[in-house]
Image (spheres, rainbow, N blue to C red):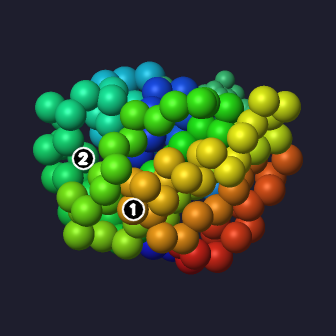
């Protein structure tokens, strides 16, 4: 498994994705710190939301092979800035989360991820499991 770091807004679904990918054994804590769990690196939403934490994301990304930026499909706005991925010298994939939710707008979420510079984009749901297989293939 490739070391994969998850970055995204608070409550966008980073921990849920790691939980599903790792087979339910992960119990996330709401800590203001970067967390390592097997091949996964979880980051606090605050690190994306406040640009004075970007340096912490950049430093942590040195430990990963794949950077996964997560956009919640139920949100109508994004705090991921345009060209965000250009700060990272890593392969970046975009993950649309919560596509099972009735209010999900995956097309809008994809647009935010492309503007941020993500190349490969996968639509996922931790509830239905959609996209999880495809994601596992990419990071295996
Ligand atoms: N419907 C739906 N809800 C989801 C999905 N993934 C996560 N959620 C819900 O979204 C909320 C936030 O999920 P988390 O995985 O804790 O989000 P997070 O990005 O780790 O949040 P922080 O650690 O606070 O930054 C929880 O109530 C989850 O149950 C999904 O695929 N579908
Ligand atoms: Mg979390």
Image coordinates of residue 121 in percent, x first then y, are 58, 64
Residue holding disc 1: 117
In this view, the residue in front, 120 or 115, is 115
Ligand 1 image-quadrant field: top right
24 up-or-down from 65: above or below: above
The residue located at (84%, 31%) in the rendering is 102
In this view, the residue in front, 101 or 6, is 101
45 up-or-down from 128: above or below: above
Disc nearest the viewer among 1 and 2: 1
The residue located at (33%, 36%) in the rendering is 48
Quadrant of the image occupied by residue 66:
bottom left
98 up-or-down from 23: above or below: above
How crowded pointer 2 is (Cα within 10 Å; few <14, some 14-19, many 20+) is rated as many
The residue located at (82%, 41%) in the rendering is 100
Residue 103, can we see it? yes
Quadrant of the image containing the C terminus: bottom right
Residue 28, can we see it? no
Image coordinates of residue 109 in percent, x first then y, are 60, 46
Q: Which mark is residue 74?
A: none
Image coordinates of residue 75 in percent, x first then y, are 60, 30
**Count of marks overlaid on the render:** 2
Residue holding disc 2: 57
Cα–Cα span, label 1 and label 2: 16 Å
Left or right: residue 7 versus residue 105 is left
In this view, the residue in front, 25 or 7, is 7
In this view, the residue in front, 129 or 116, is 116
Secondary structure, mark 2, is helix
Left or right: residue 101 versus residue 120 is right
């Amino acid at each position: 498994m490739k070391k994969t770091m998850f970055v995204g807004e608070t409550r966008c679904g980073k921990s849920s994705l790691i939980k599903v990918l790792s087979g339910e054994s992960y119990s996330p804590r709401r800590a203001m710190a970067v967390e390592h769990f097997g091949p996964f690196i979880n980051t606090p939403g605050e690190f994306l939301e406040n640009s004075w934490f970007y340096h912490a994301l950049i430093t942590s990304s040195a430990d990963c092979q794949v950077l996964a930026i997560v956009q919640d499909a139920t949100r109508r706005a994004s705090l991921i800035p345009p060209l965000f991925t250009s700060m990272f010298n890593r392969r970046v994939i975009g993950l649309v989360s919560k596509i099972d939710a009735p209010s999900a707008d995956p097309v809008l979420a994809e647009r935010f991820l492309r503007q941020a510079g993500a190349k490969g984009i996968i639509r996922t749901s931790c509830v239905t499991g959609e996209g999880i297989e495809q994601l596992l293939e990419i990071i295996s």
